[in-house]
Amino acid sequence: MEKRASEPPIRVLIAKPGLDGHDRGAKVVARALRDAGMEVIYAGLRQTPEEIVEAAIEEDVDLIGLSILSGAHMALFPRVMTLLKKRKASNIPVFAGGIIPDEDAARLRRLGLKAVFGPGTSLERIVATARGIARRRA
Amino acid sequence: MTRSPPLPAAARGVIAKDRGALARLITSAERRDPAAASALRALYPRTGHAQIVGITGPLGVGKSSVINGLLHHLRSIGRTVGVVAVDPTSPFTGGSVLGDRVRLERDPSDAGVFIRSMANRGHAGGVALATREVTRLLDAFGFDVVLVETVGSGQADIEVRDIASTSVVVLVPHLGDEVQTLKAGLFEIADVFCVNKADLPGADLAAKDLRELVSLGPGPGGWKPRIVTASAREGQGIPELWNAIGAHERFLDETGVRADAERKQLAAELLALVTEMVEREVSSGLERDPRLRELLDRVARREVDPRSAAELLASRVRGRRAPGR
């Protein structure tokens, strides 16, 4: 109790946009972030960009993590970024993981995603990056 | 000094129905931030209109699915709904996975719904320390109904009783024999029992055990808990559940029990807040007190027993508080 009182936990939304039936990766990351002391709001499978952005606003998260395998990232991720801007929530950082070719990853970073992780990334690196990019507030 | 102070910006945001402002204020309330206290003070006169319904029961009985069913039913009859869903915090890492949203399906453009997940942050009793204040913020925002989903409850997690006007205890078949229903705690707080997963064998027996429990005599105030069977994922039994909740709410109004119940809840809230304030002051004082360590060493060496050491510390705390104030 003592250590939590000084530093409120980072709240992070983990979601899988689009028509993807496989959420093991998202669950592994959710669990690692939990074990790093974060509050992980797990939205699960088949989320539309609209649902993800609304959840991020209602949950007032410090960070959004998107997981994708379907190949639709270039359709879905830019939509999430646009909606965040439209809802005046573009101060919430976004990171992503999944099967994303390098050239797409570069384009997504230019769109404002803070980090894009491919297969084989260590959980330590994901946790450290998440902690580093999470929104800080007064 | 008689002029009322200007409304804090956060409170103005809630009054203006700014969902982001509401969400941020909830975060402040969870953090026990003084900014939340001033907003809550300003908003308090605007509360007391929402119907607050607690949904509790052991883990895995389908509380989230029942809430999903109620959410859709309530929207179909034109009521707006706030949901507060509490899940446990790890005592080891302080982290948590809040997974109740997975079951809650809704149109993200529907402004008549607001869902917030909360970690209990070490608070016992089935809800978080700030859950009541969060329901109050949703109330001030203007939601007609606020559904509070507790942590998967054990037999003694009954604090939702102090927040909700109607408490629903969700159960499933085969949780135990009829003697379980007689035990103190969870079964005592039910205004409505919901036997979920009623498509499973044994649901009739579970409902029968509950009917026998209820037939043993009415609870305090004279209410006889209703029993509803449901299969929430198929949407079965949900309108009946809402009717049973409504019957209890009417009972509260018609018998005048509501005023008395609310007073008891407020008394519990005041006591909890004072305890929180004193506890924070005492623990921060003790942490700085070098004598604590010395005393702890003596307890470890079996020179002083824990209770005597605690009494000594308590008397010092009282001594510090007494002269100045």
Image (cartoon, rainbow, N blue to C red):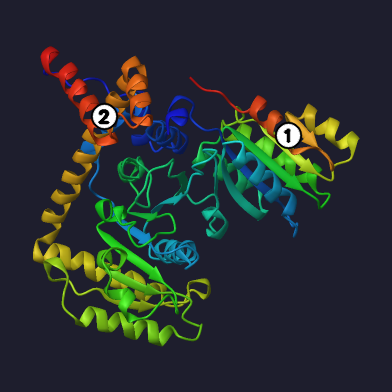
Q: Amino acid at mark 2?
A: Ala
The residue sitting at 38% across, 30% down in the picture is B300
Give how far across and how far down residue B96 sits, in percent. Answer: 54, 44
In this view of the protein, which residue sits in the foreground, B297 or B130?
B297
Q: Position of residue B112 (x, y in %)?
A: 43, 51
Question: Does residue B113 appear in the picture of this structure?
Answer: no
How crowded is the residue under tag 1: few (<14 C-alpha within 10 Å), some, or many (20+)? few
Left or right placement of residue B152 versus residue B136 in this view: right
For the residues labelled 2 and 1, the Cα–Cα distance comes to 43 Å
- Are the residues under marks 2 and 1 on the same chain? no
Task: Please tell me whether mark 1 sits on a helix, a strand or a loop.
Answer: helix
Quarter that holds the N terminus of chain A: top left
**Which of the two residues, A30 or B309, is positioned nearer the viewer here?**
B309
Mark 2 and mark 1 in contact? Answer it, CB < 8 Å.
Answer: no
A60 over B128 or under it: above or below: above
- The residue that appears at 30% across and 20% down in the rendered structure is B285
| Residue B33 placement, left or right of B222 | right
Disc 2: which chain?
B
How many marks do you count on the picture?
2
Q: Would residue A45 be found to the left or right of residue B11 on screen? A: right
Q: Is residue B302 left or right of residue A138?
A: left
Question: Toward which corner of the image does residue A101 lie, by quadrant?
Answer: top right
Rendered position, B246 above or below B152: below
SS at mark 2 in the image: helix
Q: Label 1 is placed on what type of residue?
A: Glu
In the rendered image, residue B137, in percent from the top left (x then y), is placed at 34, 40
Q: Position of residue A65 (x, y in %)?
A: 67, 40
Instruction: Please give the residue where the numbered disc 2 appears in the rendered image.
Output: B309
Q: Residues within 10 Å of mark 2 (few under 14, many from 20)?
A: some
The label on residue B153 is: none
Q: Residue at x 39, y 60 (%)?
A: B154
Indicate which disc residue A124 carries. Answer: 1
